Amino acid sequence: MTNRKKIAAGNWKMHKTFAEGQGLAQEIRTMADTELMNDAQLLIFPPYIHLQGLAKQLEGSKIGIGAQNINQFEQGAYTGEVSASMLTSIGIHYTLVGHSERRQYYNETNDSCAAKIVIALKHTIVPVYCIGETLTERETNQHFSIVEDQLHALKGLSNEDISKCIIAYEPVWAIGTGVTASSDQANEMHKHIRVVLTRLFDEHIAQGISILYGGSVKPDNAKELFSQSDIDGALIGGAALASRDFINIAKSF
Ligand code: PGA
């Protein structure tokens, strides 16, 4: 691994009441302070309504906090949506973009993701851009081209902006299923992502970006995944809901 940032990111999805979220955040903070000796960066992505409270609670800690989604417009008549400036106004500087569940259930496309990435960066929010193929796409050998198409959402960015982004490769067939991509399969795709980024930007940019793997990452498979040349961390769903598992994954670098 180069000097790329190592990141363990927890996507809480639609889990935890506020009180439960406060408890989980506190446990993670305590364990991170007392046990986490490596330089892994911890990020959590709780539901929107927890963000302000948890950002306050985690002030001064090593844990970064982000939103699970962001709207692509500055403001306006978009009932139920949350804008970039609302997020920064409560101290939030990370967001997931294009998680497969949002692509699947809320019709997010590569184009809408591209717009979300642009507005996030404009407002000093780091986008964690989620990409990955479905099972059918892998079985029909389209996985490399699907991921390449998804990466084209980044195409118009300046070198300065793309360098701020984080990419998460999450094969849809591995999310929440208990099936993990093998470390070889994951690393092969991460390498492909760097090839595409080299084409879209340059080698230096491609080698500098942190690419996380996501999809049934657990404490018992994290070490093997993190030992791969091009895997810089994980985006963790289920296992991020238990402080012990989340910290043990972060300790696996
Ligand atoms: P999982 O979810 O770890 O539960 O598979 C990963 C994700 O959706 O980000």
Image: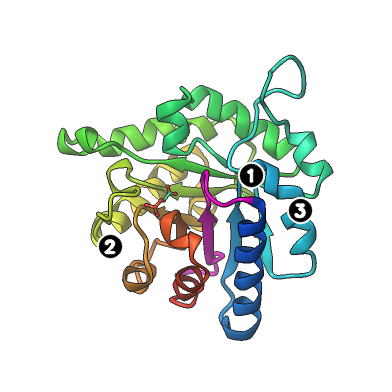
Give the residue number, with chain letter if any, for mark 2.
Answer: 183
Placement of the N terminus among the 4 image quadrants: bottom left
Using the numbered discs, state the Cα–Cα distance from disc 2 to disc 1 in whole angstroms: 28 Å
- Looking at the picture, tell me which residue is in the foreground, 72 or 60: 60
Tell me if I can see residue 93 in this picture.
no
Q: How is the image coloured?
A: rainbow
Using the numbered discs, state the Cα–Cα distance from disc 3 to disc 2 in whole angstroms: 37 Å
What percent of the width, then of the height, locates residue 156? Answer: 58, 30
Give the residue number, with chain letter if any, for mark 3.
Answer: 53
Amino acid type at circle 3 is Gly
- Which residue is found at the position 46% from the left and 22% from the top? 107
Give the residue number, with chain letter if any, for mark 1.
Answer: 67
Picture disc at residue 96? none
Q: Quadrant of residue 56?
A: bottom right
* Label 2: which secondary element: helix
Crowding near pointer 3: few (<14 within 10 Å), some, many (20+)? Answer: few
Magenta stretch holds residue 10: yes
- Which residue is found at the position 46% from the left and 75% from the top? 248
- Which residue is found at the position 70% from the left and 22% from the top? 73
Amino acid type at circle 2 is Ser
Which range of residues does the magenta coloring cover? Answer: 1-17
